[in-house]
Image (tube, rainbow, N blue to C red):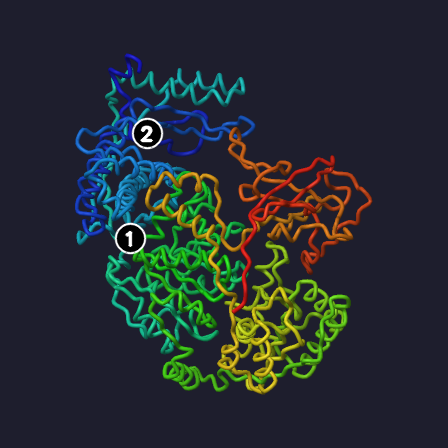
């Protein structure tokens, strides 16, 4: 530290560059450090004591607030942010490393909070908790309640962030005023009074307002200063501008002797949103009428009463397993009471294909909800990996985000739609290091409800993880709901700690629901559909064209038999779906009518970039009762809100048939709905029945003339659940590290290894054609193995991986390297011939039709003939220079059928 720094320390809390981002600023504002810290202390003091995690939390957070920025004067620096080309973008400031200078003689815990603020990473938090546990007086509370430290740190950071956002708004620094997703609060100005700001949620107890004063010293660059900066600009030395301005500011501060004459003061008032103050107590009937404009059915009413909690501190912690039929309104039964209770609702879904339907439904209700609570922002988060976005709604409309990174959402949302895989990833705080613990904390907040829809969809390894996750959340006292239409009794036995609300096997409840559907909803034909089994159609792997042709003819026959009908046709293989689609397309006179497109193909290998729009078109037709033919695979069978006249399905296990039939006459308004089953054997890869189960299933199918969900559900068998001890142990290790700060398990987290559904890792398949936007899907790597006859070995196909470049702080595509596949982000690129980096080598060009999707998967890897390791799989890749690369992954345990 220089002599001038000791004499006149740089006592700045924050620095602001109001106005345009000019290389020569008109003025710079410096908030006094004492003013900033004083405001943070005032916010801490006003924080509702009932929202603090423990009785001693207030004193610790208050002490941390007093010392958290004490190291700023020593670390102050102004910098110039530049582009990759070295061009000036804006001035920024830094106090890098100041938090490590925080010291407290009174409380080691408070000191740890002060040092921990800003980063909020899982590594920092677990390390700090581990260190605190060494002190006897902290051991007991951190063992019993390991999230107390993280919760207090979060409150400290929220107080700091609230003050920061208000300061940015007061000092008119629009860039810094961008809404931060780390902030659990939304701040908006009162349009009629520029000294009033509204904040939601309100955490300051019964008081109606909070007054804060903001001060700023003003520095206006002199003519000499301007000439100095101009010299760097003229010499095109933008990168040197930061150091030059830093030197100018520090000289100015020295001349002012640390007490500038020009000091501005503005006092503002922070208030709760008026709509929050006016919040009312809801009944199920009133809330459904307001938000959905319909009357809740008995199941929805019972679920509302089980979940709804008007207490702001969430006294209820429901742990419910809901069994109810497809189309009975399970989604609304959870969404509505969650919104009425101001819960953060997290909805992990079993497949990404369900997200588009759920997104549209959630968005519709969130827009209405934002009208109920005027001027209050509500938001929807989509988090799947390929999709990461946050959508904000206000007064019935979607509004633009004030953020520089729309993909960084940190679960700041009223509703979060995700997948089980991604939710596990967030549960264990994987991802960007900074703020990574935000996910575990928000998952475990009192006002969070986690609902697992289509809970019957998980089996084998996925069920092991699913069950471990649900049990962990239950033991932590979290609010959880599982929803299913067809979960087997074997799986239900393992979830016996949940309260069951059963509208399938409880006939009294089932009858009340049916009576409501018939009398109130006027669903005269509820659950009624004819059934036909076309058993004489056989699929021969040597000649699949015969099966495909007969399937197509049945579709066309049904289409011609009933005008303006809606048909869903489901097959088990993508190749069959594409072939049937092409045959039907060639047979139809026209694929369009006045209402638009009539024929659709939808499956999991259609590009991620196209699937959402296809599903949206299908749903638009369905909602308007317009005719369509949808040819699909199991990608459509769960969670999709469609109401077909006819369902035509290749024969499949009973649980799948029930789900598919749920898309037929879903609204109970079709008098002649029918289900047609085709084929005489279930493909081995899809089968869940043993021989006796298959015989019983056939017996019931042969005698059925009306589709009977109850009879078919009695045929459901399940794969015997053998919990893979390796998955159980890995889950336990990750949990002990993230939630108990057990540093002996840190290595498991550092490896980034989390097995969600399968030990087989996935790769991203990319088709590139010139400057066109690439099309992508995700596939397991074992589906990319070369066939013996090599008829799936295509030209210009390359295996690559994303690697993080620390110098550029960006991910870059590099050649695939040796090692464990789990630690790699593998990308398989297919280039159109003569447009890739390689040469045309006599191999066939990969035929890609975006309408049909990636029908054939390219053979990229070779499975070595000899592999003596019974626990590990190896795949060999040879690049264009014939250089060999081997990737490895763990083999799965084998399963048997009950």
Residue 167 falls left or right of residue 54:
right
Q: Residue at x 80, y 47 (%)?
A: 843
Residue 76 falls left or right of residue 714:
left
Q: Is residue 596 visible?
A: no
Q: Position of residue 502 (x, y in %)?
A: 38, 75
Q: Residue at x 73, y 75 (%)?
A: 550
Judged by depth in the image, the label closer to the viewer, 2 or 1, is 1
Quadrant of residue 27 in the image?
Answer: top left
Quadrant of residue 11 in the image?
Answer: top left
Image label count = 2
The tag on residue 181 is none
Q: Badge 2 local density, few (<14 within 10 Å), some, or many (20+)?
A: many
Q: Badge 1 local density, few (<14 within 10 Å), some, or many (20+)?
A: some
Q: Position of residue 566 (x, y in %)?
A: 61, 76
Is 630 drawn above or below residue 741 in the view shown?
A: below
Label 1 residue SS: loop
- Please report whichever mark, 2 or 1, sits nearer to the chain's N-terminal start: 2
Q: Position of residue 514 (x, y in %)?
A: 42, 83
Residue 360 falls left or right of residue 552:
left
Q: Position of residue 185 (x, y in %)?
A: 32, 49
Q: Is residue 851 visible?
A: yes
Is 433 drawn above or below residue 686 in the view shown?
A: above
- Which residue in the structure is indicated by mark 2? 29
Q: CA distance from mark 2 to mark 1?
A: 30 Å
Most foreground residue, 222 or 75: 75
Quadrant of residue 75 in the image?
Answer: top left
Most foreground residue, 318 or 229: 318
The tag on residue 201 is 1
Q: Residue furthest right?
A: 842
Q: Which of the image's four quarters has the N terminus?
A: top left
Q: Residue at x 38, y 50 (%)?
A: 412
Is 881 drawn above or below residue 616 in the view shown?
A: above
């Amino acid at each position: 530290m220089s002599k001038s720094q000791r004499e006149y320390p740089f006592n700045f809390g924050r620095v602001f560059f109001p106005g345009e981002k000019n290389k020569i600023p008109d003025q710079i504002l410096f908030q006094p450090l004492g003013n900033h810290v004083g405001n943070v202390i005032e916010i801490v003091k006003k924080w509702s004591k009932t929202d603090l995690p423990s009785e001693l939390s207030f004193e610790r957070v208050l002490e941390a607030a007093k010392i958290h920025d004490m190291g700023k004067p020593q670390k102050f620096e102004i910098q110039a942010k530049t582009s990759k080309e070295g061009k000036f973008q804006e001035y920024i400031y830094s106090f890098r490393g100041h938090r490590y200078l925080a010291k407290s003689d009174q409380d080691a815990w408070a000191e740890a909070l002060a040092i921990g603020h800003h980063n909020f990473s899982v590594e920092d938090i677990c390390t700090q908790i581990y260190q605190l546990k060494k002190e006897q007086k902290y051991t007991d509370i951190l063992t019993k309640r390991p999230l107390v430290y993280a919760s207090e740190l979060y409150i400290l950071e929220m107080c700091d962030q609230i003050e920061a956002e208000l300061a940015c708004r007061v000092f008119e620094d629009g860039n810094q005023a961008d809404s931060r997703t780390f902030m659990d609060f939304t701040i908006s100005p009162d349009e009629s009074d520029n000294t009033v700001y509204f904040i939601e949620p309100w955490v300051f107890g019964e008081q109606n307002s909070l007054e804060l004063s903001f001060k700023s010293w003003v520095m206006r660059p002199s003519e000499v200063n301007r000439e100095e900066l101009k010299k760097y600009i003229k010499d095109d030395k933008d990168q040197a501008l930061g150091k030059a301005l830093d030197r100018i500011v520090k000289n100015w501060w020295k001349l002012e002797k640390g007490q500038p004459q020009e000091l501005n003061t503005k006092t503002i008032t922070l208030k709760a949103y008026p709509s929050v103050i006016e919040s009312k107590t809801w009944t199920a009937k009133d809330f459904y009428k307001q938000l959905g404009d319909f009357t809740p059915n008995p199941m929805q009413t019972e679920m509302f009463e089980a979940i709804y909690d008007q207490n702001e501190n969430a006294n209820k912690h429901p742990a419910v397993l809901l069994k109810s039929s497809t189309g009975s309104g399970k989604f609304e039964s959870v969404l509505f009471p969650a919104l009425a209770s101001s819960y953060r609702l997290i909805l992990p879904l079993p497949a990404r294909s369900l997200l588009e339907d759920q997104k549209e439904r959630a968005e519709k209700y969130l827009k209405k909800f934002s009208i109920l609570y005027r001027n209050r922002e509500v938001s929807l988060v989509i988090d799947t990996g390929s999709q990461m976005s946050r959508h904000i709604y206000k007064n019935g409309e979607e509004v633009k985000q004030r953020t520089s990174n729309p993909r960084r959402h940190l679960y700041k949302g009223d509703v979060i739609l995700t997948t089980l895989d991604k939710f596990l990833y967030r549960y264990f705080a994987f991802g960007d290091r900074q703020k990574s613990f935000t996910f575990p904390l928000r998952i475990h907040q009192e006002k969070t409800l986690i609902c697992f829809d289509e809970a019957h969809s998980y089996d084998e390894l996925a069920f092991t993880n699913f069950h471990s996750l649900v049990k962990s959340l239950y033991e932590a006292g979290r609010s959880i709901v599982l929803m299913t239409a067809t979960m087997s009794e074997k799986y239900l036995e393992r979830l016996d700690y949940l309260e069951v609300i059963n509208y399938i096997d409880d006939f009294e409840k089932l009858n009340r629901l049916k009576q409501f559907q018939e009398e109130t909803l006027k669903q005269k034909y509820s659950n009624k559909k004819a059934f036909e089994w076309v058993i004489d159609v056989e699929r021969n792997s040597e000649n699949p064209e015969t099966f495909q042709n007969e399937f197509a003819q049945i579709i066309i026959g049904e289409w011609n038999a009933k005008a303006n009908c809606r048909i869903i046709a489901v097959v088990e293989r993508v190749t069959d779906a594409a072939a049937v689609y092409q045959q039907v397309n060639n047979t139809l006179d026209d694929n369009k009518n006045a209402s638009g497109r009539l024929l659709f193909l939808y499956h999991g290998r259609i590009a991620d970039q196209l699937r959402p729009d296809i599903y949206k078109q299908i749903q638009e037709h369905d909602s308007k009762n317009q005719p369509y033919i949808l040819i699909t695979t199991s990608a459509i069978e769960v969670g999709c809100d469609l109401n077909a006249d006819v369902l035509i399905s290749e024969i499949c296990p009973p649980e799948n048939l029930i789900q598919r039939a749920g898309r037929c006459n879903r609204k109970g308004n079709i008098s002649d709905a029918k289900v047609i089953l085709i084929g005489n054997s279930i493909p081995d890869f899809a089968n869940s029945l043993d021989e006796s189960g298959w015989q019983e299933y056939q017996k019931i199918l042969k005698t059925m003339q009306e589709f009977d969900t109850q009879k078919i559900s009695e045929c459901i068998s399940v794969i015997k659940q053998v919990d893979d001890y390796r998955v159980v142990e890995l889950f336990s290790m990750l949990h002990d590290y993230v939630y108990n700060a057990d540093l002996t398990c840190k290595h498991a987290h550092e490896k980034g290894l989390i097995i969600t559904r399968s030990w087989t890792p996935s790769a991203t398949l990319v088709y590139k054609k010139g400057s066109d936007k690439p099309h992508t899907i995700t596939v397991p790597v074992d589906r990319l193995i070369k066939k013996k006859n090599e008829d799936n070995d295509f030209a210009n196909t390359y295996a690559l991986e994303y690697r993080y470049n620390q110098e550029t702080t960006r991910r870059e595509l590099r050649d695939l390297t040796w090692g464990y596949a789990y630690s790699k982000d593998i990308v398989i690129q297919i280039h159109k011939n003569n447009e890739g980096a390689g040469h045309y080598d006599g191999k066939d060009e990969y035929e890609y039709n975006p309408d049909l999707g990636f029908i054939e998967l390219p053979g990229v890897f070779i499975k070595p003939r000899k592999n003596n390791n019974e626990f590990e799989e190896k795949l060999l890749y040879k690049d264009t220079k014939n250089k060999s690369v081997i990737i490895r992954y763990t083999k799965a345990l084998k399963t048997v059928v009950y």
